[in-house]
Image (cartoon, rainbow, N blue to C red):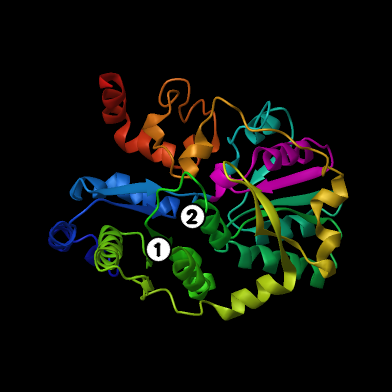
Amino acid sequence: MKYIDEFRHQQHVELLATAIRNACTRPWTIMELCGGQTHAIMKYGIDQLLPNDITLIHGPGCPVCVTPLQAIDKAIGIAALGDVIFCTFGDMLRVPGSTKDLMTVKAEGGDVRTVYSPLEAVTLAQQHPDKQVVFFAIGFETTMPTTAMSVYQAQQMGLKNFKLLVSHVRVPPAMEAILSSAENKVQGFLAAGNVCVVMGYQEYLPIAEKYQVPIVVTGFEPVDILQGILRCITQLEQSQVTVENQYARAVQTSGNTTAQQMINRVFKPVTRSWRGLGDIAMSGFELSADYTDFDAENAFQIAHINTQEHQECLSGKVLQGIIKPSQCPEFASRCTPESPLGATMVSAEGACAAYYTYRRQQSITENNSQ
């Protein structure tokens, strides 16, 4: 397929892998920030093409995975109400809450529906004026423009029965939280190209300068990722620090300013809790003053729900890049996609799910040999 096949071309991949091996003279640790990149690395065996001195670790780039347990419990509490149609993306259905998941609520009679866009939830609110329609708004800056547009349209239409349960988060503050941690191992980042399509990459410049780490905006195909790694390694080897844009075919420096204007119109930055990372200042969003009537937390009085993460699930350490999924003692034993302990195993972009899908047997063999 045009614009995809050329980024999977075997000869290009081999040339880039050779260039990386030639450029690398010492150990380096790089974090890819997007779950889509993690799955591509596992699926195509990109990490196995690299020299042993290069370690790839997986960041908090899965929107489902970083949604905290208390947000899941709030969603479950609302979805179980009799007069509610609860709308969510499909990969949220089986993320475990404290005692159940949204799929269980649906099985017990709750009206839980899978949608592909929050605008579908607005249509449902129009079609069911006797019901409260709630959309579970999760994700990074990538999905925020359509969420913002949904509530903007609902206000323009005068809909009183449309609500958002907001758990949107921002990538740059999470990067800073990782880099400032005493357990930080990251020496360079592959930034998420899809986020930068919306937001651009200007806000990464002060992070690169402050922490002296190269940041390369990177796409999702094998050639993209290997080019991103090569650019990052080249900077590290030459003691350079800058932000580069490998994904220039999709990303502009300033991003999509129209989408940003819609986000800024509807939302305002706040402190948010991240699974595994805790509270991070100004890392998330809530509805701005003009749109508080659409806030599900206020409408359903669920702000008091405050639950703790399960101790046996080490997804928090996976999301910080402290351990790899296969290093968790529950991986592929008590924790599987059919019976997950945490979101990183059940999400389509989760690192644990990627290892289970593409490296399960290898991981089990390595653990048994230790």
Q: Quadrant of residue 139?
A: bottom right
Q: Which mark is residue 364?
A: none
Write the start and end of the magenta stretch as one range.
63-91
The residue that disc 1 covers is 213
Please tell me which residue is depicted at 27% across the width and 26% down the height of the picture. Answer: 366
Q: In the rendered image of this protein, does residue 189 appear above or below residue 264?
A: above
Q: Earlier in the sequence, mark 2 or mark 1?
A: 2
Q: Are marks 2 and 1 in contact (CB under 8 Å)?
A: yes
Left or right for 107, reference 210: right
Up/down of 248 relative to 279, above or below = below
**Residue in view at x 37 percent, y 47 percent:** 57
Q: Quadrant of the N terminus?
A: bottom left
From the image, tell me which residue sits under label 2. Answer: 179
- C-alpha separation, residue under disc 2 versus residue under disc 1: 9 Å
Residue at x-position 42% and y-position 62%? 191
Q: Nearer the viewer, residue 309 or 252?
A: 309
Residue 68 magenta-drawn? yes
Instruction: Count residues near mark 2 (Cα–Cα under 10 Å), then give few for <14, some for 14-19, many for 20+.
Output: many
Identify the amino acid type marked 1: Val
Residue flagged by tag 2: what amino acid is it?
Answer: Leu
Callout 1 secondary element: loop
Q: Residue 100 at x, y = what percent?
A: 66, 28
Of residue 48 and residue 159, the one placed in the foreground of this image is: 48
SS of the residue under disc 2? helix
Q: Is residue 172 magenta?
A: no
Residue 30 picture location, percent across and down:
35, 54
Taking 47 as reference, is 210 left or right?
A: right
Examine the rendered structure and indicate whether residue 313 appears above or below residue 321: above
